[in-house]
Amino acid sequence: MRIGFIGLGLMGVPMCQRLLQAGVALTVWNRSPGKADGLCRQGAVLVQSVAELVVSCDVVMLCVSDTDAVQQLLFAADGIARHARGGQLLVDFSSIAPAATRDMAARLLAQTGMRWVDAPVSGGVRGAESGQLVIMAGGEVADIDALRPLLAQLGQRVTRMGPVGAGQVTKVCNQLIVASNAMLIAETVRLATAAGVDAGQLAPALAGGFADSLPFQILAPRMAAHCFEPVQWRVATLLKDLGNALALGQESGSTLPIATLAQQLMQQHAGQAGNAQRDLASVIELYDG
Ligand code: NA7
C-alpha cells in the first residue's frame, strides 16, 4: 500500500518521519518547495503535483492549515477530486470545520468513490515526534479499522467517535479546552510574576496536581521565560480552532462565553503585525506592562 501525504508543516513533517521510520512507502507533496528535503533523505518520494500523488497512492493523507486549504486541495481545477478513484481513502489530519467536512466528504464520494476519514490529532509537535498523538476519528468502522496499523505509528490512541465529521466535532471540543486554557495560563503566569513568585517554577511545582495539563507544562515555562522559539503552536492555528468552536456553538445552539472571551483576547494579540505566525506562548505579551 502506498501512502501519499500532503502538508509538510509543523505537524506534517514529524508525522511523515514516524511513518518512514515504520517502513511505510511514502510519497509527499507540499505547496511550498523545500520542506520535503529532510524527508527525501529518509526515503520519501517527492512528487511535483497533487495529481501525481493521488494517481500513485492508495491512501491520501492531508495535514494542512484550515478548511479553505482542504477545500482547495480537494476541489481546485487539478485537485484531488479530479484524479481520485473508488477504493481510495482520504485521511484528513487537519483540524477543520465539521460541517464542511461532511459536505466535502459527500461530494468526494459522489464524484469519485473515494471515501473520507477525518482524523484530527492532539498532542502538538512533541506528540507527533514521539508518536504519542491522540487521534479522534470520524468515518466508516471498516475504513478506520483498515487504517489502524498506520495510525498506530502516529498515535497512542485512535478513537472512532462516529460517522464522518465526528472526529472534527471532537477536535473542536479538544481545542475549546486548549485555547481557553492557554489564555488562562498566560493570566496565571502574569499573576504569579506580579505577586512576587518565580513563574518559571509553576510548572514543576504544580505537576501532577489538579491544575496540571500538557499545555500547562509546555506553555507556562515558555511564557515565564518569554521563550517563543521553536514554534510549537501558531497563534493563527488556535484562533482558527476557536473560530470553528464558536461556529459549531452557533450551529448547535450552545453558548460558549469563555471561548468567546479567549477568541477576543487572542484576536487582540494577533492584530499586531506578525503575531499570528508566532508561537502561542507569545500571548503572554498581552499581559506585559
Ligand atoms: P503549519 O505549520 O502552519 O503548516 C500548514 C501546512 O498547510 C503547510 O504545509 C502549508 O503549506 C499547508 N497549506 C496551507 N494552505 C494551503 C493550501 N491552500 N494549499 C496547500 N497547502 C496548504 O500548521 P501545522 O502543521 O501546525 O498544523 C496543520 C494542521 O494540523 C492544522 O489544521 C492544525 O490545526 C492541526 P506551505 O508550507 O505553507 O506552503
Image (cartoon, grey):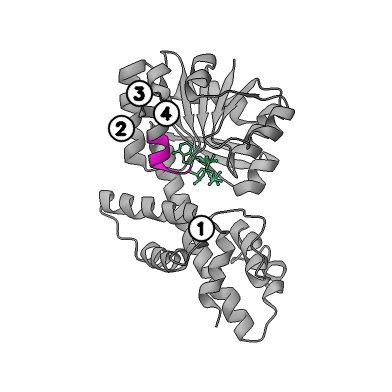
Amino acid type at mark 4 = Gly
Q: Are marks 3 and 4 in contact (CB under 8 Å)?
A: no
Q: Comparing marks 1 and 2, which lies closer to the viewer?
A: 1
User: In the image, residue 159 lies at what x, y percent?
Assistant: 51, 36
Q: Earlier in the sequence, mark 2 or mark 3?
A: 2
Q: Is residue 103 visible?
A: yes
- The residue where tag 3 is placed is 108
Q: Earlier in the sequence, mark 1 or mark 2?
A: 2
Q: Are marks 1 and 3 in contact (CB under 8 Å)?
A: no
Label 4 residue SS? loop
Cα separation, mark 1 vs mark 2, equals 27 Å
- Dominant SS of magenta comes to helix
Q: Is mark 3 within 8 Å of ligand 1?
A: no
Task: Say which quadrant the C terminus sits in.
Answer: bottom right
Camera-nearest residue between 171 and 112: 112
- In-image side of 204 versus 144 (left or right): right
Q: Is mark 2 within 8 Å of ligand 1?
A: no
Label 3 residue SS? helix
User: In the image, residue 13 lies at what x, y percent?
Assistant: 63, 38
